[in-house]
Structures are given as structure tokens and as C-alpha cells.
Image (cartoon, rainbow, N blue to C red):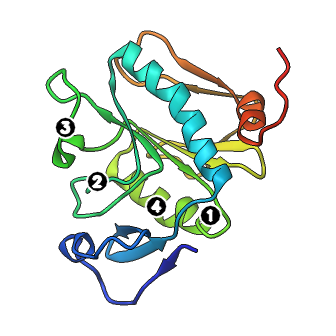
Amino acid sequence: MDMVLSTNSWSRAEVLAIPDDGNRYELIDGELLVTPAPTGPHQRAVAALYDRVAPYVRAERVGYTCLAPADLDFRAEQVVQPDLFVAPLVDEREPIHWPEFGIPLLVVEVLSPSTAKQDRITKRRRYQRSGVETYWIVDLDARLVEVWKPADERPEIRAEQLEWRPGGAESKLVVDLPRLFREIWGERIEG
């Protein structure tokens, strides 16, 4: 269950000092979010998306694909741990240390009942304000992806095909969403 621990404003240093207890701690604009371990379908979705995004990012040489846990700060003293994200290259090389990761080109959050509000509102607003170029909210139950850009007031809803082409890429990534969701849910895939 995604929850706020207190009404006090937290600092990045305080959040990073919390002992590892298996939960994921994030700091969004002073608000501490705590998320327990994800479900099997959630992790299957993250893995399936990683399997599609990472080879594309490597082939196009536009960044580095990474998974949570992470300690991104978005250059704003946050502690953000997206399910999956693509960090831009740094001086034509992949970033190594968290401060080098900067503002991701792509952030992906997979919804669960306990995180939907935070992913759709709190985190989305922070990602938009921080300048994340593209934010995908993956709704497993609805079998769709919401695509957000920094200036969007409403998402683009994708149910059949998801496309992404960051700056510097020669081709675009195309994800067959019905096939992706069948894979995630362990359903038979024809052809």
C-alpha cells in the first residue's frame, strides 16, 4: 500500500538514511511515499517492458535503461524510484553514479491499486515539472498505457500500439500492447 508516513516535510538526507526494510521509499516535494514489495504481475510487466526498451535504447545509443530501486533526485532534492527509466547519455557515455542520471528521457510506472493515485497525480506532476520527456503509466487491469509529456493536461491513451522516439534516435520503438498484456498475464500468444 502506497502511503504517506507523516505530515512533516522530509528531506532527501532523511529518506536516504532510512534502514532497508524491503519497502520502497520515495520523496516527492517533501512527501514521503512508502510502497511495499510489488506483485507478480507488476514485476512481469516491468520485465516485459525492460525487454523491449533496453535493446532499443542500446541500439539507438540514446541512454541507459534502468530499474528500481534507484535514488534519482531530478536535480530537485527528491528521492524517486521509477519502476523503469531511461537516463540520457553523459558526454556520450552511459551514466554510472546516481548524480549523473539527471532527468530521464522516459519514466515508466506500472499501476497497482495502492499506487494508482500517487502515480497518476503526485508523481506525474513531479515528473512533468522536472521535465521528464515521456511518462508512461501502465494500467494492467485496463490493458492500456497513459502517455504524458511535460505540458500535457490530459494523457494520450494507448491500447493498441505504443510508440516512443527520443531525440537522437533514428527509428522509433513500437510496442504491440495487446501482445504485451497477453505476455504479462500469461495468456497464449498467437503468431
Q: Residue at x 64, y 61 (%)?
A: 112
- Judge depth for marks 2 and 4 and give the one in front: 2
From mark 3 to mark 1, how far is it between C-alphas? Answer: 30 Å
Residue flagged by tag 4: what amino acid is it?
A: Lys
Percent coordinates x, y for residue 27 in the rendering: 34, 69
Kindly identify which residue carries mark 2. Answer: 72
Badge 3 element: loop
Tag 2–tag 4 contact (CB < 8 Å): no
- Residue at mark 3 to residue at mark 2: CA–CA distance: 12 Å
The kind of residue tagged 1 is Ala
Q: Secondary structure at mark 2?
A: loop
Q: Nearer the viewer, mark 3 or mark 1?
A: 3
Q: Residues within 10 Å of mark 4 (few under 14, many from 20)?
A: many
Residue that label 4 marks: 123
Determine the secondary structure under disc 1.
helix
Q: In this rendering, would 122 be left or right of 100? A: right
Residue 134: x and y, percent? 47, 39
Do the numbered discs 1 and 2 sit on residues whose CB atoms are within 8 Å? no
Say above or below: 100 vs 164. below
Sequence order check, earlier mark of 3 and 2: 2
In the rendered structure, which amino acid carries the disc numbered 2? Leu
First-in-chain label (4 vs 3): 3
Q: Residue at x 78, y 31 (%)?
A: 178
| Vertical arrangement, residue 56 with respect to residue 156, above or below | above
Return the mark for residue 116. 1
Q: Residues within 10 Å of mark 2 (few under 14, many from 20)?
A: many
**Which residue is located at x 85 percent, y 29 percent?**
188
- Sequence-first disc among 3 and 1: 3
From the image, tell me which residue sits under label 3.
96
